[in-house]
Image (tube, grey):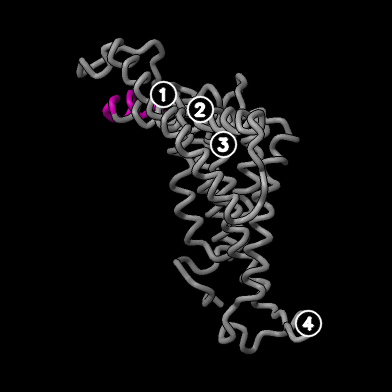
Amino acid sequence: MKIFFYDNDSFLNRLNPLSKVVTSLPFIFLICLINEIWIPLAFIVFTAFIVLVLGRIPLIRFLKILAPISIFFISIFILFLLASRSDLTVGSPILFSIGEFHFYEYSVRLGLIYAIRIFALLILILPFSLTTEPSTFIRSLIQNLNIPYKFSYGVMVAFRFIPMIETEFNVVRSAHKVMGFSDDKGIFSYFNKIKRYSIPLIVNSIRLGGRTALSMDSRAFGAFENRTYFKTLTFNRNDWIYIFAYWIIGLLIFIVAYKFGLMGKIGFYIGEFR
């Protein structure tokens, strides 16, 4: 999540992280039940507005994040085009053919529905992931949901080990290059690299874990059941405004889609919703 986080003073950044979770989770579940493209498309546009306007995320950064999601979207669409069950395409007209491959109208529709649904589910996570610093989210879990701080901070420290281990890996790799170790390709070279890298990384990880444990003990971490916080995270007026405004707009999208017959069948279907 730290990779996506964009630090600024936007409206979304100032919100309690849990308010951003509470707003999107119900609609993520509901979109999983929708078997038409219109509601997911509406939520894609709605979420893009939230990210760009309320989150003040630069358009270029937003498009860079959308690039891998779009590749995944195209892959899902092509997969459904090529792998739709033959019994589902019976009676469906052929849109076009490439050699021996026939692409049916129903396969295209099915691929679009599932690809756009998955695209919408990934987009709905962005207001949280782009505007929430991981440590702030952990603190909100502790203060608002009363999750034991020993467990929560342990998880946060474990996540922070990942970039540290990556740094150690780069140091070891640079040291091997200086010492003249070959960087050949191939299966045997791959296993030799694992052997060369694993021992220094394991030793450094143990040393890093020991230093972290000593640092936590020296600060009496876990000695008291309750603790104080430098920054207190609560639900203020802006949080409640955001939650209720999001829910109202989300419900309006569903109501309008139902009114105009754009909702389709509701449920977990695997293709059979004609």
**The stretch drawn in magenta includes residue 140:** yes
* Mark closer to the chain start, 2 or 4: 4
Tell me what residue is drawn at x 54 percent, y 42 percent: 125
Report, in whole angstroms, how far the alpha carbon at label 2 lies from the one at label 3.
27 Å
* Mark closer to the chain start, 2 or 1: 2
Q: Nearer the viewer, mark 2 or mark 4?
A: 2
Q: Is residue 245 left or right of residue 50?
A: left
Residue 104 locus on image (x, y percent): 69, 80
User: As shown in the figure, which amino acid type bears the numbered disc 4?
Assistant: Ser
Please give the residue where the numbered disc 1 appears in the rendered image.
208
Q: Which residues are magenta?
A: 138-150
Residue 165 locus on image (x, y percent): 50, 31
Tell me what residue is drawn at x 34 percent, y 28 percent: 154
Please give the residue where the numbered disc 4 appears in the rendered image.
97
User: As shown in the figure, which amino acid type bears the numbered disc 1?
Assistant: Leu
Report, in whole angstroms, how far the alpha carbon at label 1 lies from the one at label 3.
33 Å
Please give the residue where the numbered disc 3 appears in the rendered image.
127
Report, in whole angstroms, how far the alpha carbon at label 4 lies from the one at label 3.
41 Å
Crowd class of label 1 (few under 14; some 14 to 19; many from 20; radius 10 Å)? some
Which corner quadrant of the image does residue 63 belong to?
Answer: top right
Please give the residue where the numbered disc 2 appears in the rendered image.
164
Q: Nearer the viewer, mark 2 or mark 3?
A: 2
Crowd class of label 4 (few under 14; some 14 to 19; many from 20; radius 10 Å)? few
* Mark closer to the chain start, 4 or 1: 4
Q: Are marks 2 and 1 in contact (CB under 8 Å)?
A: yes
Report, in whole angstroms, how far the alpha carbon at label 4 lies from the one at label 1.
59 Å
Residue 128 locus on image (x, y percent): 52, 35
Q: Is residue 60 above or below residue 88?
A: above
Tell me what residue is drawn at x 53 percent, y 46 percent: 250
Which corner quadrant of the image does residue 180 belong to?
Answer: top right
Which corner quadrant of the image does residue 10 belong to?
Answer: top right
User: As shown in the figure, which amino acid type bears the numbered disc 3?
Assistant: Pro
